Each structure stands twice: as structure tokens, then as C-alpha cells.
Amino acid sequence: MALSDKKKQAKKQRKQAKRKKVLASKARGAWGGGAKAAAIQYAGFPLHEALGADALDEGITNLVLSRRAPDGSIGAGVFLVDTYCLGVKDAFFTLFGNEEKYAEFKDNLTASNPAPLVSHHPSCFRKLLEGAIDYARDLGFSPHKDYKSAAPMLGDIEAAPCPERFEYGKDGQPLFISGPHDSPARVRTVIDTLERRCGSGNYQFVSYIDGMLD
């Protein structure tokens, strides 16, 4: 890839990360501490759709689980999942007054996602989430603090019916991909944790340098 193409790609990645951060900030600001209560309420409504990348267990991707209320409003639990290392990196619950607003949100989220979002069976959605969390916990990492606010949206969905087998890590080892917004202190903490749990040479690490993966 030419240097100019790399710069364009890095600029696009920064723009997408900023858009995703704004979306999450707006959602949290709208609900504050009431997000979990709202998610519990919407968990009782019929499932609208479960969206994720075509291959759910290939790296870092957004997962969206939405439910529709009788009044036409749509509640959505959004999860940024890292199957390579950290499990649930981010999560939040948000509410849309109608299908049009929800569709706009999906378009914006799709633009920031590494891969197109497609429909999945909800049982596989839960199975992947729980597997990613278990894998990350075994490495010493807990789900994002807002996971508890969005998790009620899973409701009574069971993971057992999912026929798929998911793999965690990359090539048999944890792979930590630091994001463009990760501070040096955060990166150091993750690496130190992997060093203690896995030992030198038993994990992989990819970082952003000047907006590009190194």
C-alpha cells in the first residue's frame, strides 16, 4: 500500500473512531444512570434484530441487539467486542423513537465498523458475548463498566441453540490491538497483565503509531 493510501486510511479510521465516540457519548448522556432500568424494560419486548460482522469471532466489531416496543420505539444494546483479547471493550443502551432514527444510527455505526453488519441468530449473539467475556477474564480483563447497563437486553435468549463454534485469540494466542484513543498508560497496563498471565512470547501486540497500525 502506498504511503498516501496509508495516510488516507489512517485519517478515515480516526474519523470513524470519533463518530463512534460521539454516538456513545450521546447515548450515555440521554440515559445516564437510568440506562440499565430502560434496558430491563425493553428486554421484555419482541426482538427486532441482532447484528454483527459476518464472522463474529474475527477481531474487534460492534454487535447490536435491538427490541421493538408496542409504541414503535426501538431500544438497542450496543457492544464493542474484542474476541482477540479484551472481551467487551465498550457497551451502552440507547433508545430510538422510530425506525427512521434507528436506521440512521445503524448507518453511522456501520461506517465505523471494520466489517459490514449482518443479521445473526440471537443465540449466537449471546454465545459469542459470553465466550469473549470468559476468555478475557481468564487473561485478567473485565468487561467494560457499562456492560451491565446494556446486558439486560439479552433477556431470556439462550446460547445453547447456537450451532457455531467460536474461537478466541489469534493463532492460538491473545492479540492485543491498541486503539487510537488508548493512552500509553492503558497500553502498558494491558501488556503488563498479558506478561504476567501468559509470559513473554505467548501473546501478540499491535499498536497505532501516527494513526497507522504497526
Image (tube, rainbow, N blue to C red):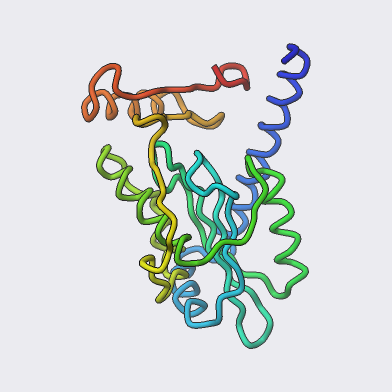
Which image quadrant: the C terminus? top right
| 152 shown above or below 202 | below
Q: Position of residue 45 (x, y in %)?
A: 53, 82
Q: Residue at x 48, y 72 (%)?
A: 39
| 119 shown above or below 80 | below
Q: Residue at x 64, y 56 (%)?
A: 118
Q: Nearer the viewer, residue 150 or 4?
A: 4
Q: Nearer the viewer, residue 133 or 57?
A: 57
| 113 shown above or below 158 | above
Q: Position of residue 75 (x, y in %)?
A: 58, 71
Q: Residue at x 42, y 22 (%)?
A: 205
Q: Residue at x 67, y 32 (%)?
A: 13
Which image quadrant: the N terminus? top right
Q: Is residue 13 left or right of residue 202?
A: right
Q: Position of residue 155 (x, y in %)?
A: 42, 74
Q: Nearer the viewer, residue 205 or 58?
A: 58
Q: Nearer the viewer, residue 136 or 55?
A: 55
